[in-house]
């Protein structure tokens, strides 16, 4: 007990010296989980589905990725490509381009793709590294199927697009406020009756939920839409779809019952 008090005392001394450190606790997944439970005591996680079930049992089996920092999981890209491969999906809208990997994989199946990102100027104003800003769209620019829009989703005129999309990917700023704001904008202006929405970073990994984003999604779509949410297994994503899907209960320590065969080919870029 004394050792615990000593630790606490020493910790408080450090926090008093550097108060900003409190943000580390405030922004931790444990704190977000507690806040989440205060509001959503009936939710622990989303029901899980198989990626292939989103397209009649056929999952796309090839995706391309730089496999670098900030790259989505291969299965996240597989999820998007599988959804894009549905006959009903003809149009795609994305928040968050980065190197263009997600939209590049979607554009193999969907001719009409739009991706929205902060402009280079805005990234510079935010003090982000030039080399980071320069890489935006390196895989997607020049593809005639992809329209690149620049803007900050905080004040972007979503209504002005005057278009509803079949598939939407929300993958911009992952802070709680921005997930809520992006989600509300998408739901207010870009959805038709059968649109499918995917959020990245619903989870940190296939088995660890990111409660800040999860709460943002639930608050953003409103209680009437919660029943349409799923977590595609092996991904970091959440999906909104009105498809009737067979689901299973999430188990963070599930014993694996399937294995993926992955062939990796390197090409020059
Ligand atoms: C995680 S990355 C997107 C990754 C990409 N979707 C992929 O899977 O290849 C997030 C992107 O969102 C952009 N972003 C962050 N905040 C934004 C905002 N408020 N408005 C528009 N874009 C934003 C960043 O510049 C970054 O490129």
Image: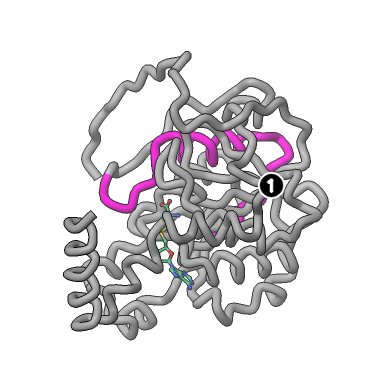
Quarter of the figure with the N terminus: bottom left
* Residue 96 visible, this angle: yes
Residue at 40%, 54% (x, y): give it: 100
The spot of residue 9 in percent (x, y) is 21, 70
Residue bounds of the magenta highlight: 68-94
Residue 262 drawn above or below residue 124: above
Q: Is residue 254 left or right of residue 113?
A: left
* Any part of residue 90 in sight: no
Q: Residues within 10 Å of mark 1 (few under 14, many from 20)?
A: few
Determine whether 166 is above or below 246 in the image: below
Residue in the foreground of this view, choosing between 250 and 201: 250
Residue at the disc numbered 1: 42
As rendered, which of 163 and 32 lies closer to the eye? Answer: 32
Per the image, label 1 sits on a secondary structure element best described as loop
Q: Is residue 233 above or below residue 180?
A: above
* Residue at the bottom extreme, as displayed: 125
- 78 falls in the magenta region: yes
The structure residue drawn at horizontal position 57% and vertical position 30%, both measured from the top left corner, is: 51
């Amino acid at each position: 007990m004394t050792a615990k008090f000593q630790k606490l005392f020493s910790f408080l001394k450090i926090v008093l010296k550097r108060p900003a450190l409190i943000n580390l606790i405030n922004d931790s997944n444990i704190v977000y989980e507690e806040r989440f439970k205060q509001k959503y005591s009936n939710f622990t996680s989303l029901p899980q589905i198989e990626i292939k079930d989103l397209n009649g049992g056929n999952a796309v089996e090839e995706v391309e990725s730089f496999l670098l920092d900030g790259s989505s999981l291969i299965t996240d890209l597989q999820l998007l490509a599988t959804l894009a491969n549905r006959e009903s999906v003809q149009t795609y809208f994305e928040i968050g381009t980065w190197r263009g990997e997600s939209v590049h994989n979607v554009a193999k199946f969907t001719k009409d793709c739009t991706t929205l990102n902060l402009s280079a100027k805005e990234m510079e104003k935010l003090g982000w590294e030039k080399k980071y800003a320069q890489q935006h769209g390196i895989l997607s620019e020049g593809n005639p199927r992809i329209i690149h829009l620049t803007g900050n989703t905080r004040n972007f005129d979503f209504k002005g697009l005057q278009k509803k999309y079949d598939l939407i990917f929300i993958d911009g700023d992952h802070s709680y406020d921005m997930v809520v704001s992006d989600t509300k904008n998408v739901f207010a202006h870009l959805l038709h009756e059968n649109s499918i929405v995917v959020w990245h970073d619903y989870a940190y990994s296939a088995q660890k939920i990111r409660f800040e984003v999860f709460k943002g999604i639930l608050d953003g779509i409103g209680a009437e839409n919660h029943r349409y949410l799923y977590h595609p297994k092996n991904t970091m994503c959440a999906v909104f779809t009105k498809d009737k899907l067979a689901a299973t209960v999430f188990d963070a320590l599930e014993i694996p019952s399937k294995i993926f065969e992955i062939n990796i080919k390197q090409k020059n870029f």
